Amino acid sequence: GQQVMQIPQYQHVQEGEDFTTYCNSSTTLSNIQWYKQRPGGHPVFLIQLVKSGEVKKQKRLTFQFGEAKKNSSLHITATQTTDVGTYFCAGRGAGGTSYGKLTFGQGTILTVHP
Amino acid sequence: DAGVTQSPTHLIKTRGQQVTLRCSPKSGHDTVSWYQQALGQGPQFIFQYYEEEERQRGNFPDRFSGHQFPNYSSELNVNALLLGDSALYLCASSFGAQNQPQHFGDGTRLSIL
């Protein structure tokens, strides 16, 4: 079945440093979504990417979808303590037995030291 | 505008028992998906309900079943509970069955003793 791998598992940064998490799927995706989960909370939708090579920005966050629609990244510029949490990518299968199913990566836990 | 609500928030059961978890979707949403999230892991897709039918299913055994009611609310039933079923169970709602952002509830923390 479809697998979505996310690296790194943990990232500790000083406030003001940049942060990047990477997501790779074993199969081609129709779209990819990114979520943020604060400690003790539930995943909150950030963005969805659909087109090959798509880049979207939300203030300090930049999201990219790979040309082959199998990988994606989230980059945060100048992290703040409010960025703390776990960032998940979730890929929706484009075909076969994975068609339409949303598979989450294992997440990257971001810690920001003031 | 109420978001996704789940009940109960916490539940303790013993092995072999059965459990029912409930979810009310966000107003205006008609699709409900259920996920299992083990500690330190990403949510794992259990199944999705749309128009009162199970539309998609993840790699979970038949012990996991569900239902969607005409008002779009949903239940997740788990039979013959195992220790490994201990997890946070998340419900997510969306509009339409495909390609829409999902809005998650706060989840039900299920502990199996």
Image (cartoon, coloured by chain):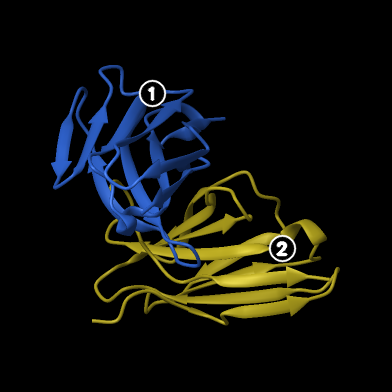
- Same chain, labels 1 and 2: no
Q: Is residue A60 above or below residue B109?
A: above
Q: Is residue A40 above or below residue A52?
A: below
Rendering coords of residue A52 (x, y %): 21, 23
**Res A100 visible:** no
Give the chain letter at badge 2.
B
Residue at figure coordinates x 70%, y 51% from the top left? B61
Disc 1 designates what residue?
A: A28
Residue B82 is left or right of residue A12, and the answer is right
Quarter containing the C terminus of chain A: bottom left
Residue A52 is left or right of residue A87, and the answer is left
Residue at figure coordinates x 73%, y 60% from the top left? B85
Callout 2 environment at 10 Å: few (<14), some (14 to 19), or many (20+)?
many
Residue extending farthest to the front is: A114
Rendering coords of residue B34 (x, y %): 51, 60
**Nearer to us in this view, B54 or A24:** A24
The chain letter of the blue chain reads A
Residue at figure coordinates x 28%, y 57% from the top left? B96
Disc 2 designates what residue?
A: B86
Question: Disc 1 and disc 2: Cα gap in Å?
Answer: 32 Å
